[in-house]
Image: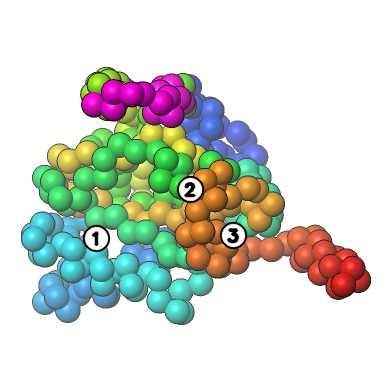
Amino acid sequence: MKNSFHTEELKIELIDNIHAKFKSYSSNDIYNLERLIIDTIKTDCGEKIEKLEDIHMFYSPKTINNLRLKAFNAINADGIDWKKILENIASTVIHSRIGPDYVIQQKANLSIQMPNDHTSILPIHSDCVSGDSPWQQNIWIPLTRAHNTAAMFIVNKIDSLEYLKNLSVESKDMTTKNERLDRQLNSLNRDYINCEKGEVIMFCPGVLHGNTVNKEAFTRVSINIRVKSIYAPNSRHGNSDREFGTYYKAGFISNAGKLAIDIDKAMETGNE
């Protein structure tokens, strides 16, 4: 899976030839997100915390959910313009991979993984199994270091597709099928994607991914948010909670995209 290379123009590291790791185009936005979370939780820590990597020094696993909720609300407050943030952080990569016209997830997700916290594990999964579109991309933004077990892992595309095919096969004996699938999951190689603060991963959330217990000496904090071309299909399952207006909101629309929308509206009006 480490068959990666860099392009001189975009300075993208390709992982498994499909996922992109790159340096954020805006260090200010990364810094502002970090400070927003720190300022949100500072009063709970007696105004002492200065680094997100030190959260475990002030919080325990029993109290982390309250902190996560406060930070989640802060990064999704009305004044936080995720369309602008994503354009600042990753516009070149987004436009090169899915085009200039896209929708974004209504709410950005937040992950906090303290050392040895078994309550914050995100088990291995594929987002498409739960109804997400395979055409979308997930933008993963670490606000701290994300090394080794503090990083997320991704299973290579071949193994992921093989598992998804086996998952979709009907079986009369579901117990035997589930046991077989569990054995397959447990045998898969899980590649941790190491990142420094300021680096970003844009990956296909349809492949298997997740995290494990953080065995490092620091807390990892990361944000993830999904984007999809406005012209790309939604989930084949047709889930109403995965459509524009519920799951997605308007992202960046190019001038050409705006013209296409205006022409479409004009044609629709003319046919009435």
Foreground pick, 60 / 28? 60
The residue type indicated by label 2 comes to Asp
Q: Are the two marked residues, 1 and 3, in contact with CB atoms closer than 8 angstroms?
A: no
Position of 196 relative to 180 (above/below): below
Drawn side of residue 30 relative to residue 51, left or right: right
Q: Position of residue 65 (x, y in %)?
A: 18, 63
The circle on residue 103 is: 3
Q: Nearer the viewer, residue 140 or 13?
A: 140
Is residue 230 rendered magenta in the image?
A: no
Residue 237, relative to residue 107: is it above or below? above
Q: Residue furthest right?
A: 270
Q: Is residue 160 visible?
A: no
Q: Identify the element where label 3 is drawn.
A: strand
Q: Disc 1 vs disc 2: which is toward the camera? A: 2
- Residue type beneath disc 3: Val
SS at mark 2? Answer: loop
**Badges 3 and 2: C-beta atoms under 8 Å apart?**
no
- Dot 2 corresponds to which residue? 132
Question: For residue 152, what is the image quadrant?
Answer: top left
> Residue 129 location, x and y as percent?
42, 40
Mark 1 or 2, nearer chain start? 1
Give percent across and percent down for residue 104: 54, 60
Q: Give the Cα separation between the discs numbered 1 and 3.
A: 29 Å
- The residues bearing labels 3 and 2 have C-alpha atoms spaced at a distance of 14 Å
Which residue is the site of mark 1? Answer: 52
Residue 245 is drawn in which quadrant?
bottom right
Q: Of label 1 and label 3, which has the lower sequence position? A: 1
* Within-10-Å neighbours for mark 1: few <14, some 14–19, many 20+: many
Magenta range? 159-175
